[in-house]
Structures are given as C-alpha cells and as structure tokens.
Amino acid sequence: MSKLKSISYALLALILLGTAGAGEMLQPQSVTAQTQPASQKAKFNGFFAPKGRAMPKDSEGGASRGRCLQNRTGIQETVTLLTPQGNSGLTASARPTFMANIDQTSANQVFFSLKNEDESYFFEMTMSLPSSESNLVKFTLPDNAPPLEMGEQYRWSVAVICGSKLGPDSPWASGWVERVEAVDQEAVAALQPLEQASYYGKAGLWYDTVAVLASHRENEGINADSAWGQLLTEGGIKVDIK
C-alpha cells in the first residue's frame, strides 16, 4: 500500500511540475505589477452620474442673452455653465469650484451668487473676466464663504455685468449643486490627475471631476483635450470651450 501511495504522489508531482526538468524546482510566479510611466497607464474612464436622485424644484435653471454678448457677426450668444445633463451635479467638497463659459463680450466683470432653496445661505462675489483667449471662468468658494452642508441643494448663478452694474438685460445662467459624503481625500491625492478624475467620475461627483480635468488641461495642454472633450460630451455640453 505504501509503495502505491509513493507512486501516486510521484505522478501527481510530475503533473504539477508540467514541463519543469528533472531535479528542477517549480518557482512561484511573481505577482508584482510591472511599473509603467503614469502617462501610459493613467486615463480618464468617464463620468458616471448617480441614478435615482431627486432633482431640485427648479432643476432646469435658466439662461439669457444680453446686449454685451455678441460675436463678430453680430449674433448674440450666451453664458454656458459647466453642469451635467439635468443642470444639477454633486460634489464632495465643502468649497467647490464652479465654471462657466462666457462667450465673446465687451464686459469686464461677471457676478457669481450661491444660495440654498430657502435662501438661508447666500454668498455673492464679483470678479474680473480673464484677459486670456480662454472663455472659461472659474469661481471657487473662498475661505470666508460658509462651507456647503451635506445633503443641501444650492443654486448657483452667473451673470455678465454689461455696464456699471447688473441690469434686467444682463446675460445670466444658473444651475444646482449638492454636497454629498466626502471621499477618501488621502487616497485620491496619491493618484495621477486622470486617475483622480476617473475616481470622482465613478462616484458621480461632477464638480470635482471637472475641476481636476480643467487643472490637468491647463498643465498638459492638448495632451488632456481628449479627456476634457469626453467629459463635456457625456455632460451634454455642446459649446466649444477653449
């Protein structure tokens, strides 16, 4: 019986060893991932909006044209907010960054406001329009602004100041934002920019995704245009944002 067991064990060993030569030990395969340059392995995997969330009462927001927004052919254009389809998006930040595309204008200033549904929270600021070729304007809540509360929905608006002050014909647009439970910021900080954007995108955090890609685009130029264009397409934003 012991001799039969020895033969069986010997056959089993040969099967497991496969093509290993006689007297040769089978070495375990390494499971360590091969390191690649970040530029090769990192990519933006898209924005995945959360399903089934209740929309604000006035989720459609609004937009208007005005006398100081006019292109070279005389056609009046609009203010376009970087919001996803439905005009409402999520953020994990207490002081997120909001962005708007301001078409060609003779104005020098733009007005930004943020308030919740019952207007118990209200913040506003006026800033100069950038002198660069880009039409993209960014509004980041400063430290002196109250942080967004979890689960609260806020309406943010942007208006172009055509003269010395806001008027009934000032071009404007508005959208919505809601702050949700914070993500693991320490883990996100260790990722490459496109990986960070993918992380936020998978979590459905629109404003965080846009902020990371916009910053990455400023640093990388045309190398980041593909990811930027993909996000705008998925968000339903059809204007050409420089």
Image (cartoon, rainbow, N blue to C red):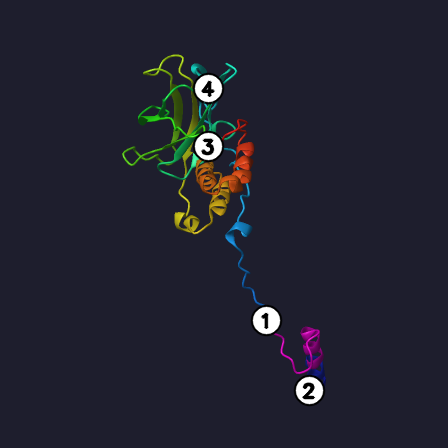
Q: Residues within 10 Å of mark 3 (few under 14, many from 20)?
A: many
Q: Mark 1 and mark 4 in contact (Cβ < 8 Å)?
A: no
Residue tagged 3: 89
The residue depicted at 56 percent of the width and 64 percent of the height is 31
Q: Of the two numbered discs 4 and 3 on the same chain, state the one appearing first in sequence.
A: 4
**Circle 3 SS class:** strand
**Mark 3 vs 2, N-terminal side:** 2
Q: As shown in the figure, which amino acid type bears the numbered disc 2?
A: Ser
Residue 122 location, quadrant: top left
Q: Quadrant of the N terminus?
A: bottom right
Q: How many marks?
A: 4
Asked whether 163 or 204 is in front, the reply is 163
What residue type is disc 3 on? Answer: Gly
Badge 1 amino acid? Pro
In the picture, the disc for residue 137 is none
Of the image marks 3 and 1, the number of the one nearer the N terminus: 1
Where in the figure is residue 51, as x and y percent of width and height? 53, 35
34 to 139, vertically: above or below? below
What residue lies at 52% left-to-right and 15% top-to-bottom? 73
Question: At numbered mark 2, what does the secondary structure look like: helix, strand or loop?
Answer: helix
The three-letter code of the residue at mark 4 reads Ala
The mark that comes first in sequence, 2 or 4, is 2
Residue 242 as seen in the image, left or right of residue 158: right
Q: Which residue is mark 4?
A: 63
What residue is shown with label 1? Answer: 28
Q: In the rendered structure, which segment of residues is drawn in magenta?
A: 10-28
Q: Which mark is residue 2?
A: 2
132 inside magenta stretch: no
Q: Residues within 10 Å of mark 4 (few under 14, many from 20)?
A: some
